[in-house]
Amino acid sequence: MIRRPPRSTPSNSSAASDVYKRQVEHRLDIALPYADYVYAMDRGKIISKGSPSEVLEDKMVARAYLGG
């Protein structure tokens, strides 16, 4: 699951200031270039969360997805 935290806009802007998107994607090559914040799940539980690079380097994620 990928979530983009809300982004602020200048106070004089008429644009919406709280915009984010949640997306479930299993192909990391598609999802990660667009993600600011990532959750990794295994068997329905969140095992890691953070920036894409933090999650990819997490040992629990490697064990869950690559075995070992």
Image (tube, rainbow, N blue to C red):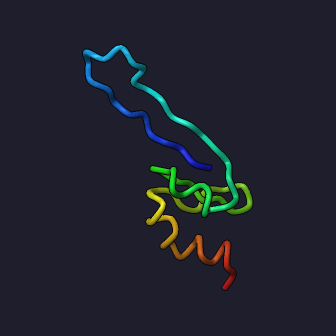
Could you say which is closer to the camera, residue 13 or residue 36?
A: 13
Question: Farthest residue in the right direction?
Answer: 43
Could you say which is closer to the camera, residue 15 or residue 2?
A: 15
Residue at point 53%, 54% (across, down): 38
Image location (x, y in percent) of residue 23: 64, 44
Q: Quadrant of the C terminus?
A: bottom right
Image location (x, y in percent) of residue 28: 62, 62
- Image quarter of residue 11: top left
Residue at point 32%, 26% (across, down): 9
In this picture, residue 20 sits left or right of residue 44: left
Residue at point 48%, 60% (across, down): 52
Could you say which is closer to the camera, residue 35 or residue 65?
A: 35
- Image quarter of residue 16: top left
Image location (x, y in percent) of residue 51: 44, 57
Could you say which is closer to the camera, residue 4 or residue 44?
A: 4
Query: What count of labels does the image hold?
Result: 0
In this picture, residue 11 sits left or right of residue 36: left
Query: Does 64 sit above or below residue 9?
Result: below
Residue at point 50%, 64% (across, down): 55
